[in-house]
Image (cartoon, grey):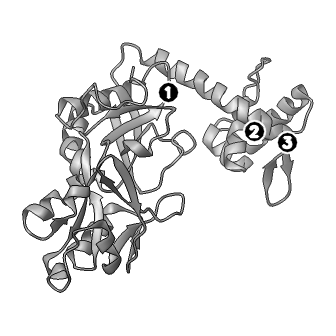
Amino acid sequence: MKQNFTVRHSALDGVEAFLSVAKHRNFRKAAAELAVTPSAVSQAVRTLEARIGAALFTRTTRSVGLTEAGERFFSRARPAFEELIAASEIARGIGQRPAGLLRLSVPPAVVPILLEPIIASFCQAYPEIELEIVAGGELVDLAAQGFDAGIRMGDLIAPDMVAVRLSPSFPMVVVGSPEYLRHRTTPERIEDLRHHACLRLRRSNGSVAPWRFAKGNKAIEAIVAGPLIAHDYPTLLGAAIQGAGLAQVPSPIANSAIADGRLETLLTAFAVTSPGVFLYYPERHQVLPKLRAFIDHIRSQGSGGARDGRPLKAAR
């Protein structure tokens, strides 16, 4: 571990130390991240505060918090510093083989359909890249949580992201098992769902998602009820296969169970179409080589990566 924190007399002196402490709310964790001593981080922050002329942190024996000045400085300094780091990484990566840790945030349903078929070939093609796939249903702040990119359905992606299509659009299908339907009247209208056990999805913001349908040119949201609320589509699909009730899920994850008779599709005349699945990442002037390698590879493997899909902003 380095014992001395290098001090340079410039506007950036102490900024990296400040940002690390602000992120962790802890001087020791910041020191570990920067590979320096806690006293070196503390001195760098004190020097920065002296140069700015304002206290940036409130410190107690148990916690570290940001002052109002610290909050404002953090909100402006973090994106500027990240751009500087990104610029340095891009410059270093010119003409070099893609390398480093590539972290992706993906929903569990996407892993077996889109990623499993290409993981082995990608790792073989780019042995200097470490691919980390974090499967979870919640929408995350990619930059704040250290992800290079995420994968989600297009209607869930913020408009300030660059998006690359990974799949064609597909219907959201209502499915039920033959065993469940054997003892109940098959729904033929959206209104008939009130008489059925409907399995529901809780969104990352805490709300329970309504079921969405299309009736002609009219979009309809149906508030349904049932015995199960889950945080991801694979759980809903599994419960539907076991006969717990009806579920509305993306058709790609249900196709296998529909084909082998474990599930039946219902209300197909009212199915709404999802824009499809996209890989997305924060807008930058240039995509880092490791991410560009992944985008090119998944497209080359025929995973639906049409270049004229629904990019929220054209990938560079």
Residue denoted by label 1? 283
Hey, what amino acid is under mark 1? Glu
Label 1 element class: loop
Can you tell which of label 2 and label 3 is closer to the viewer? 3
Q: Earlier in the sequence, mark 1 or mark 2?
A: 2
Within-10-Å neighbours for mark 2: few <14, some 14–19, many 20+ = many
Q: Earlier in the sequence, mark 1 or mark 3?
A: 3
User: Could you tell me which quadrant the C terminus lies in?
Assistant: top left
Does residue 301 appear to the left or right of 154 in the view shown? left
Label 2 element class: helix
Residue denoted by label 3? 68
| Quarter of the image where one finds residue 11 | top right
Hey, what amino acid is under mark 3? Glu
Residue at 85% in and 51% down:
59
> Is residue 151 in sight in this rendering?
no
Q: CA distance from mark 1 to mark 2?
A: 31 Å
Residue 194 picture location, percent across and down? 35, 76
As drawn, 304 above or below 66:
above
Residue 308 picture location, percent across and down? 28, 25
Marks 2 and 3 close (CB-CB < 8 Å): no
> Is residue 179 in sight in this rendering?
yes
Residue 185 picture location, percent across and down? 20, 80
Residue at 29% in and 30% down:
309
Label 3 element class: helix
**In front: 223, or 260?**
223
**In front: 278, or 274?**
274
Q: CA distance from mark 2 to mark 3?
A: 21 Å
| Quarter of the image where one finds residue 264 | bottom left
Residue denoted by label 2? 41
Residue at 21% in and 52% down:
252
